[in-house]
Amino acid sequence: MLLHAVADGVIAASFLIIPAALVYIHKRRGESNPGETALLTLFALFILAVGLAHFASLLALWVPAEGIEGLLKAAAALLALTTAIVIWKLAPQLLRLPSRDRLQAEVAAHLRTFDELKGARHQLEERVEARTKELAEAKQRFEIALRGSPISVFSQDRDMRFTWSHNPPAGLSPEFLKGKTDADILPAEAAEMILAAKRKVMETGEAAELETKFELFGRKRSFYLLIEALRDDHDVVLGTTSVAVDISERKANEDQLRLLLRELTHRSKNLLAVIHAIARQTASRTRSVEDFLDRFSARLVAIGCSHDLLIADNWHGASLRMLVEQQLGEHAEQFGETIAIEGEDVMLKPEAVHNLGLALHELATNAQKYGSLSIPCGQVRIQWQFCEEASKLKLVWQERGGPEVAPPQRSGFGRAMIETVVGKALEGDVSLSFPPKGVRCVIVIPSAQVTSRG
């Protein structure tokens, strides 16, 4: 009897402790589905009922309680049957629960996946870093290429408002342009033409080119524009992207070139007229072809020398000192000795260079044949000065120490050209005299024939 009592007591106590442990574990675990909770509840109640039945059997050894014991056994039987039925219904779900090996395999697979993802992330980060470096280098090259250049790049949205710009024209900045339209910045006529071209590009999707000129910040500017449609990944037009090249300097050079060509054409016609007149006058005052060729060739060389001086300074003019030295070039070794050249250097206009060059050539030729340059002891002094009050330039040719001079019996081509042609062409005064001591020529020209003073 004692053995039965001890056994029932231990079983009853154990069956009361086990449900409590199951409930504790279930609550601490905190993760279960409704089926698991229901099964656990039934199983705990079943064990609890069995434990109570054994407890009733223990009491029955000393106190008659057959009704209570039977009732508890009936409840335990009902709970056992219910638990068995529920277990079989939940069996498919329970079978799907992962086993320890399966969980370990899944954990290992997840760890491998994690390592693979980690490696892929590392590779992706390296690619992103490399691509970022490439983009930075491309941006740097782009900025270096445009820095200091006349090329500007910018984009605009569909409302023609600037959204981005790089290296904008002088006087503008990306911050100033952002949010504005061409009409807010440019003169109305230029803005209207440019906006019309950009709208057409957005409508047709075809790139457009145009040149435009306008005044910006008080300066006339010329630009070449290349306009293209700005699209997204779905080929939807978002606005325009444009490249503007400042061609103001090129246009100014073209205008200057056209002006120089017109001026050159005009001066070439005048020069041909002068050459024609020289040819006629030389021919009328020579007796042989050889004499004509000698005199005419010398005069062409004199014209060519003046022409060279003008070309060297882009037809802006020439130095009077250089003109004198060039026309007396055959006697360069005598400069500073028998030939004295004195005066503050001035720059003459092209018309004055040609005519004064011819006059100096005729004076030098005459001095070499008949005057001071025909003998070793002769002297020539070329002196000029600028008179501020009269606003005129006075040049004096004076010969000394040569053969005694007598006034010529007739007027030759050289004298006629110096006294008539040069004076009229320069709108000045020419005085040519023949005193016995040496020829003297005074040429006075207005300051309008002078471009600058040395």
Image (cartoon, helix red, strand yellow):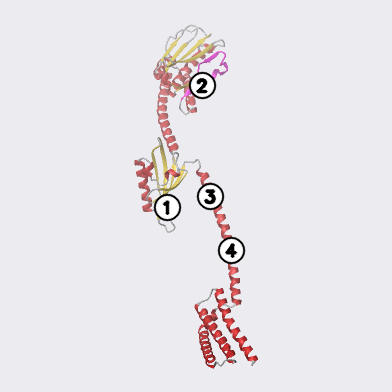
- In terms of depth relative to the viewer, which is nearer, 101 or 94? 94
Q: Amino acid at mark 3?
A: Ala
Q: Earlier in the sequence, mark 3 or mark 1?
A: 3
- Mark 3–mark 1 Cα distance, whole angstroms, equals 20 Å
- Mark 4–mark 2 Cα distance, whole angstroms, equals 84 Å
Q: Residue 269 occupies which quadrant of the picture?
A: top left
User: Which element type, helix, strand or loop, lies under badge 3?
Assistant: helix
- In terms of depth relative to the viewer, which is nearer, 287 or 204? 204
Q: Which corner quadrant holds the N terminus?
A: bottom right
Q: Which residue is mark 1?
A: 230
Q: Is residue 293 shown left or right of residue 127?
A: left
Q: Earlier in the sequence, mark 4 or mark 2?
A: 4
- The nearer-to-camera label among 4 and 2 is 4
Q: Which residue is mark 2?
A: 322
Specify few, some or many for label 4: CA neighbours under 10 Å numbering under 14, 14-19, or 20 or more. few
Q: Residue 353 occupies which quadrant of the picture?
A: top left
User: Which element type, helix, strand or loop, lies under badge 1?
Assistant: strand
Q: Amino acid at mark 4?
A: Lys
Q: Residue 214 occupies which quadrant of the picture?
A: top left
From what the image shows, is residue 44 above or below residue 222? below
Q: Is residue 103 shown left or right of residue 172?
A: right
Q: Amino acid at mark 1?
A: Leu
Image disc number at residue 138: 3
